[in-house]
Image: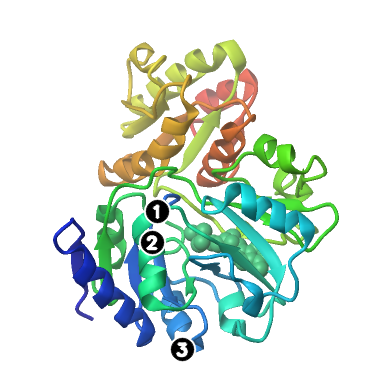
Amino acid sequence: MNTKIVIIHEENKRDSLNEAGKVIRQGGIVAFPTETVYGLGANALDSDAVQRIFIAKGRPQDNPLIVHVANFAIEPYVQNIPEIAKKLMERFWPGPLTLIFNKTDRIPSTTSAGLDTIGLRMPANQLALELIKEANTPIAAPSANRSGRPSPTDVIHCIEDLDGKVDMILGGETSDVGLESTIVDCTTIPPMILRPGGISLEELQEVDPSIIIDPYLTTPLDENIKPKAPGMKYRHYAPKAPMKLIDLGSKTGEGIKVLAKHYSNDHKKVGIIATDETKKNYLYGNVYSIGSRMNLKDVAKNLYDILRQMDSDQMEVILAETFEEKGLGIAIMNRLKKAASYDVITDYDTIEAILSLGN
Ligand code: AMP
Ligand code: MG
């Protein structure tokens, strides 16, 4: 397939959005910027169009899509709007918050991956909003990456993954938040966070203190618990190299240093995810600073880009520092843990074991 790539600027904006809206209306698929990550969009009400997203991404069929809207008139798509959802929409829309509702028949089961519920979000990015208005239909859009790869926060990432697989790629600014939306299930009491993201637990609890984090998020290795956000069970956001998170408190730096030396001696290309505060400490390995610990927004914004850089620099093993699981730190750690397939080293004995066993 020939993919039309358009980098949007002031002069071509109207025509490009008009054309992209037409592509969506006619059943095509378009990658576009949002403030969370770039999305790959199709008409959410057109089952065949939505099916094309699954094919282009190589996405498992049981992983539902988030539907993007440009206004608050969501009644045609949801059974009812619980009070809590109204409050959350008022406070956080447009923005990086997806709400789960019981769906109506207007939403085809391809979009919801067979579930009776649907996730809705109103993005804050102006181009995204204008595209939805041009298309004149809600747009189903997962992240615009091949399934399993780090999500795209720049049009370059979309081109890397999807050129030749989609009708159109629209380039705008890099994604401001850099992590996917927070997902809150409003069909349960208490409402539950199914995925941490750009809006933190603390911010949500200001609106309703009863909101909790889905217990699955803290016990992800228990195979008996079924995740309510089906996407949570898949390997996600991952670089190609195996990745380890090192969380040894004051000894973290030392742990990373000895592991980096060990792998370098083994002739492996080692990538280290450090911070502005610590990047100078490492003597072995290729050091990538993810930003300052004083500014978690920047860390979130840089995360996927760093993972992709490490892929293109062909790192063979990745060692990463960790962040306190508070505020945006919860979402950052969720993505890092997934990228590392939950390989988190929390005691020095594990490091000793790696040095002596050589794995
Ligand atoms: P993506 O946009 O590719 O990052 O994925 C969207 C995420 O939203 C996935 O983890 C889905 O499982 C989740 N999701 C979408 N719709 C629903 C829903 N109705 N119920 C639970 N999770 C959902
Ligand atoms: Mg995704």
Q: Amino acid at mark 2?
A: Ala
Q: Judging from the image, what secondary structure is the residue with disc 3 in?
A: helix
Residue under circle 2?
128
Neighbours of disc 2 within 10 Å: few (<14), some (14-19), many (20+): many
Q: Amino acid at mark 3?
A: Asp
Neighbours of disc 3 within 10 Å: few (<14), some (14-19), many (20+): some
Q: Quadrant of residue 224?
A: bottom right
Where residue 218 sits: x, y (%)? Answer: 73, 42
Q: Judging from the image, what secondary structure is the residue with disc 2 in?
A: helix
Q: Quadrant of residue 136?
A: bottom left
Where residue 324 sits: x, y (%)? Answer: 61, 25
Residue under circle 1?
125
Where residue 333 sits: x, y (%)? Answer: 57, 36
CB of mark 3 within 8 Å of CB of mark 1?
Answer: no
From the viewer's side, name the closer residue of 346 and 50.
Answer: 50
Neighbours of disc 1 within 10 Å: few (<14), some (14-19), many (20+): many
Residue under circle 3?
48
In the depicted structure, whether residue 332 falls above or below residue 323: below
In the depicted structure, whether residue 136 falls above or below residue 324: below
